[in-house]
């Protein structure tokens, strides 16, 4: 990873609290252009809240966010709207509109931002995005309720990619998937990020995902980002949560799986 | 817009060459796709050397054009090549819309489906009622299994907490009946008969009926939503594995609460309606309260009160039955809870009104007119 790559998302001093409960207390984080950044942390450490803060669904009580060098504000002006087009978000359950087919779901952002696109082109775009997200051709005409959990996530990804974003937010993309589907999704994320030049902000619990596709990992604990780096770099720190996470039973299992994989390849 | 996607046509030795320039990205397309579609082809080449930037949509348009006209893509940058390769991999025969169905067939299917669902619901309701009767029999033989605490708790939710809204509703209904009745009866100089109207219609019908509708909306829906959510979170399955019968633990207490609370609430609603009607008579028709109460005693036979109160527990049972039944039918997702809650209320109100009609005929047949 290019250490001098420009910063896609710059987070400085973000504070969030719900009532008396402090979620974030001065979160600083940089997401570099073109990288896949994994965000980990125990349940309730505010991973999703951080994502919601970056994409403007949650107003932080303090702090600043810059996306591609432009500050995020609450204003509903043209510049902010333009900024919003540059990212795609995939929510945990897919968050597909249940009354629309998968193809129509993909077309929603296109119609919203580019009302002049013809129906024919819209249909074609929806079709290739659906295939690109790894869905079978017959899934485009289906409603979300007719899809399995894994397919729903892929449909959510297709919608997130509708506007050809440079920046992609994924909230626990592999949660609730079986290991084969999860591995498939990891591979898809990696391929797409490479071929589309995407910057990916990926929230996950899945150690396999971290090992398989993340360039760097940010660890949320004690209301801030306690460490950012590659997994070997994180292992070198002595933060107790990081040690417990990566050196726990599951962490070691995921690591040894990667080692075996590498050994076999070599 | 300097970066708008543009193209020029050139006639060369090999045929038409298209030279594309500008940014081939979603936000710079404008009418580019339509204009490109207007070219019928065949074209020899499409030159994208001058294209500054390209995204997958741009790549798709180029790929699509080259496929349609047989034009060869030249001058593609590394990025453009990669994206064009990506979209051509994703080029599959995708059906974007569900297959259209013949409208006649669709109507027939929907009517058929609706009939089957209605019959199944009826069957299910009867079966559920049977299950409740069996559970009740178990409890009667073994009264210690009755969950007194749960029932008392339901009393509060179904009964006590409904007093405010039912009181307000009944009060207003009493006033409206008196006011509307008085306007009509005044034309015959018979406005004193407003007392008969208010007294009899509220005791026989409206007191209990309106209460039933309110309880269906308040408690029937709550039953369906609570039990539906518990079904969704597998609480009901957990109960079964532990050996607790959900009917005994969840349905019977709600059923009893509704059956016992409905007559009390209905009686209360009747009183408040009469109070509202009386107030209107006093203020507007100048019938003093004492006279109003005396007239009430003269014109309302005691059977009117029975007509109202006999119906009340039956309505309560119906409301609890459909609420709990629909709650138990929840499968799958959270959306279902909403749908089932709606059906519970609709079903309860529908059944209450149908039964009310039967009761009306029955009571007039036995002479309680």
Image (cartoon, grey):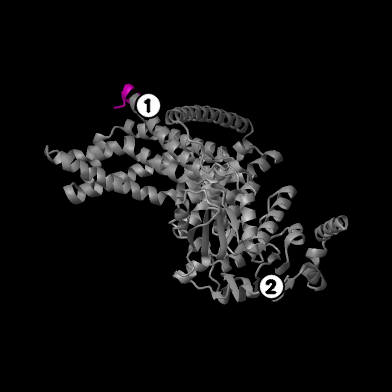
Q: Position of residue A101 (x, y in %)?
A: 52, 45
Residue positioned most to the top: B365
Label 2 sits on residue? A225
Q: Position of residue B299 (x, y in %)?
A: 24, 34
- Quadrant occupied by the C terminus of chain B: top left
Q: Is residue B302 magenta?
A: no
Q: Is residue B362 above or below residue A160?
A: above
Q: Position of residue B189 (x, y in %)?
A: 11, 39
Q: Chain of mark 2?
A: A
Residue A124 bears which disc, if any? Answer: none
Residue B358 bears which disc, if any? Answer: 1
Q: Residue at x 69, y 57 (%)?
A: A191
Q: Residue at x 40, y 30 (%)?
A: B355
Asked whether, in this view, residue B207 is left or right of residue B325, the answer is left
Q: Nearer the viewer, residue B164 or A186?
A: A186
Whole-number angstrom distance, CA of label 1 to CA of label 2: 70 Å
The nearer-to-camera label among 1 and 2 is 2
């Amino acid at each position: 990873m290019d250490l001098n790559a420009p910063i896609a998302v710059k987070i400085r001093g973000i504070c969030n609290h719900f009532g008396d409960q402090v979620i974030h207390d001065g979160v600083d984080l940089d997401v570099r252009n073109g990288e896949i950044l994994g965000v980990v942390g125990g349940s309730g450490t505010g991973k999703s809240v951080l994502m919601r803060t970056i994409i403007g669904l949650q107003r932080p009580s303090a702090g600043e966010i810059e996306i591609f060098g432009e500050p995020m504000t609450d204003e509903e002006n043209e510049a902010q709207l333009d900024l919003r087009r540059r990212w795609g978000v995939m929510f945990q359950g897919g968050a597909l509109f249940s009354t629309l087919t998968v193809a129509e779901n993909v077309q929603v952002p296109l119609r919203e931002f580019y009302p002049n696109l013809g129906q024919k082109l819209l249909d074609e775009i929806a079709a290739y995005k659906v295939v690109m997200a790894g869905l079978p051709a017959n899934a485009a005409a289906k409603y979300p309720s007719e899809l399995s959990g894994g397919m729903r996530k892929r449909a959510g990804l297709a919608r997130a990619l509708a506007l050809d974003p440079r920046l992609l937010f994924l909230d626990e993309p592999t949660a609730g998937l079986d290991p084969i589907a999860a591995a498939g999704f990891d591979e898809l994320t990696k391929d797409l990020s490479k071929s589309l030049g995407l910057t990916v902000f990926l929230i996950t619990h899945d150690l396999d995902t971290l090992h398989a596709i993340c360039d760097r990992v940010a660890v949320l604990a004690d209301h801030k980002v306690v460490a950012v780096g590659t997994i070997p770099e994180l292992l070198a720190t002595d933060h107790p949560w990081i040690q417990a996470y990566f050196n726990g039973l599951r962490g070691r299992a995921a690591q040894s799986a990667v080692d075996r994989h590498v050994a076999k390849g070599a | 817009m300097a970066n708008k996607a543009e193209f020029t046509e050139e006639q060369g030795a090999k045929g038409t060459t298209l030279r594309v320039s500008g940014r081939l990205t979603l936000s710079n397309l404008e009418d580019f796709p339509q204009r490109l579609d207007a070219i019928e082809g065949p074209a020899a080449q499409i030159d994208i050397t001058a294209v500054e930037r390209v995204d997958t949509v741009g790549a798709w348009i180029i790929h699509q054009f080259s496929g349609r006209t047989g034009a060869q893509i030249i001058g593609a940058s590394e990025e453009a090549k990669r994206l064009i390769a990506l979209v051509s991999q994703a080029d599959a025969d995708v059906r974007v819309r569900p297959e259209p169905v013949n409208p006649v067939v669709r109507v027939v299917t929907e009517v058929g489906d609706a009939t089957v669902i209605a019959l199944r619901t009826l069957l299910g309701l009867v079966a559920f009622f049977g299950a409740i009767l069996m559970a009740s029999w178990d409890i009667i033989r073994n009264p210690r299994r009755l969950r007194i605490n749960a029932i008392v708790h339901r009393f509060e939710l179904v009964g006590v907490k409904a007093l405010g809204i039912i009181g307000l509703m009944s009060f207003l209904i009493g006033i409206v009946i008196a006011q509307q009745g008085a306007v009509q009866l005044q034309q015959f100089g018979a406005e004193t008969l407003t007392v008969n109207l208010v007294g009899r219609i509220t005791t026989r019908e409206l007191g209990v009926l309106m209460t039933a509708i309110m309880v269906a909306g308040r408690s029937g829906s709550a039953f369906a939503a609570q039990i539906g959510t518990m079904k969704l979170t597998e609480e009901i399955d957990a109960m079964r594995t532990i050996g607790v019968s959900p009917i005994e633990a969840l349905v019977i207490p709600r059923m009893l609460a509704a059956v016992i609370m409905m007559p009390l609430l209905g009686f209360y609603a009747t009183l408040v309606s009469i109070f509202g009607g009386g107030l209107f008579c006093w203020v507007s028709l100048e019938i003093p309260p004492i006279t109003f109460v005396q007239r009430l005693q003269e014109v309302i036979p005691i059977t009117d009160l029975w007509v109202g109160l006999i119906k009340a527990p039956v309505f309560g049972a119906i409301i609890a039955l459909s609420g709990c039944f629909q709650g138990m039918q929840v499968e799958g997702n959270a959306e279902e809870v909403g749908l089932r809650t709606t059906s519970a209320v609709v079903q309860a109100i529908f059944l209450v009104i149908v039964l009310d009609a039967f009761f009306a005929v029955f009571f007039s047949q036995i002479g309680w007119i």
